[in-house]
Image (spheres, grey):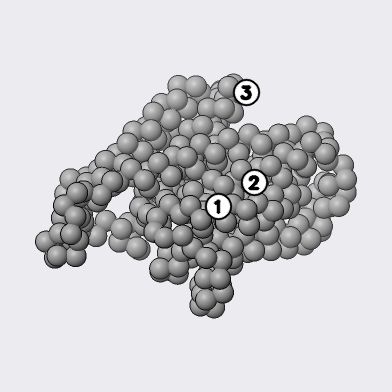
């Protein structure tokens, strides 16, 4: 397999992981009114394509550790199962997250969902292996939790304003204010699952029988594509919003929408494999634990900025809603920094 040989290469891998995982949802936004249940079929195809390509190229070349097939044969069957299971759990979580994006936008879905995942995964890792600064870790978790609350309050205020605008324009007959809880609840559920999924990934690569980054990505992708059809049918028949979707609608979509789904899945998996590589110990080149954590934990912040700056998801917001969202971004950024700094060796955290 190929691993970064210099510190600069290790940092480049981290930047790649951040950009891919923080930006892939833009492909869904670009499809406009395409239902996420249908988009996800193409997303899954793109995901497994990226997993296979990276496994049989970067994972089968070079002189760092085992090649792909040797790595798979050396790994224990339990590690295979952990990687495969992580793909299934992630798939369900990511569908919930995409459902939240379709209901509430990237500005709500990613900070709430991945913020919760960050709290759960970092806390579980610390309980399993106490290292670094507990004060920084749990202070960061409190800040991220506060950011989630600010995000939910800002979204609630924004939903009220938009409903009032529709009522004044005569575009809605109901005077009942719409609930803003659906997008937040979907994101929180996704976050709980993603945070738990990190434990399965850790078990899949730990120990002498653990898998390397590329074989782990392959097994993870296999679990994701295996579960896609069953889970997609579930969401198509029990949609989070709107009417039920028929599978024939997938074939009515435009070619551009299918391509965007493929690109979205490919980007996500490219970022995932990059993150697997980034956390793989290397005797020659490896970024500091705090630097690695900072890039990997920065995903929800980048996605939220896409939502605010590019997709204008705060359009029409009053000063109160904007204040809540600004507070969310500040709290999230501070929480990410503290949690990431807590990953440094204890003697370096002062």
Q: Which residue is mark 2?
A: 88
* Mark found first going from the N terminus, 3 or 1: 3
Return the residue nearer the eye: 97 or 270.
97
The x, y position of residue 293, in whole percent, is 54, 39
> Which residue is painted at 29% across and 39% down in the image?
150
Secondary structure under the numbered disc 3 in the rendered image: helix
Answer left or right for 206 relative to 320.
Answer: right
Q: Which residue is mark 3?
A: 128
Answer left or right for 99 relative to 272.
Answer: left
Answer left or right for 76 relative to 243.
Answer: right
* Mark found first going from the N terminus, 3 or 2: 2
User: Does residue 218 appear anywhere in the picture?
Assistant: yes
Q: Which mark is residue 234?
A: 1
User: Does residue 22 appear anywhere in the picture?
Assistant: no
Return the residue nearer the eye: 11 or 331.
331
Which quadrant of the figure has residue 232? bottom right
Secondary structure under the numbered disc 2 in the rendered image: helix
The x, y position of residue 240, in whole percent, is 43, 52
* Mark found first going from the N terminus, 2 or 1: 2
Which quadrant of the figure has residue 85? top right
Q: Residues within 10 Å of mark 3 (few under 14, many from 20)?
A: few
The x, y position of residue 91, in whole percent, is 59, 49
State whether residue 226 is above or below residue 310: above
> Which residue is painted at 74% across and 34% down in the image?
206
The x, y position of residue 171, in whole percent, is 19, 65
Q: Residues within 10 Å of mark 2 (few under 14, many from 20)?
A: many
> Which residue is painted at 57% across and 56% down in the image?
233
Whether label 3 touches label 1, CB < 8 Å: no
> Which residue is painted at 40% across and 68% down in the image?
33
């Amino acid at each position: 397999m190929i691993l970064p040989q210099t510190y600069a290469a290790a940092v480049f891998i981290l930047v790649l992981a951040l950009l891919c995982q923080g930006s892939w949802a833009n492909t869904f936004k670009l499809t406009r009114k395409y239902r996420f249940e249908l988009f996800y079929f193409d997303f899954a195809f793109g995901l497994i394509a990226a997993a296979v390509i990276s496994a049989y190229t970067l994972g089968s070349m070079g002189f760092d550790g085992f090649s792909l097939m040797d790595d798979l044969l050396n790994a224990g069957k339990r590690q295979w199962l952990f990687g495969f299971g992580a793909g299934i759990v992630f798939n369900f979580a990511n569908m919930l997250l995409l459902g939240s994006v379709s209901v509430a936008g990237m500005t709500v879905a990613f900070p709430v969902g991945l913020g919760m995942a960050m709290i759960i995964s970092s806390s579980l890792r610390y309980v399993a292996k106490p290292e670094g600064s507990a004060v920084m870790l749990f202070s960061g978790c409190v800040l991220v939790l506060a950011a989630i609350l600010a995000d939910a309050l800002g979204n609630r205020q924004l939903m009220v304003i938009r409903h009032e605008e529709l009522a004044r324009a005569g575009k809605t007959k109901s005077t009942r204010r719409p609930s803003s809880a659906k997008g937040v609840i979907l994101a929180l559920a996704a976050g709980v699952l993603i945070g738990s999924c990190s434990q399965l990934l850790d078990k899949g690569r730990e120990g002498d029988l653990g898998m390397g980054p590329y074989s782990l990505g392959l097994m993870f992708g296999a679990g994701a594509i295996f579960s896609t059809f069953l889970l997609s049918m579930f969401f198509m028949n029990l949609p989070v919003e709107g009417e039920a979707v028929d599978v024939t609608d997938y074939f009515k979509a435009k070619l551009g929408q299918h391509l965007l789904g493929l690109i979205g899945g490919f980007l996500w998996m490219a970022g995932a494999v990059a993150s697997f590589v980034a956390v793989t110990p290397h005797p020659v080149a490896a970024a500091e634990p705090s630097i690695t954590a900072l890039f990997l934990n920065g995903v929800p912040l980048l996605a939220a900025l896409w939502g605010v700056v590019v997709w204008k998801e705060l359009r029409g917001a009053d000063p109160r809603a904007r204040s809540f969202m600004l507070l969310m971004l500040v709290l999230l950024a501070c929480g990410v920094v503290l949690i990431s700094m807590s990953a440094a060796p204890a003697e370096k955290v002062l």
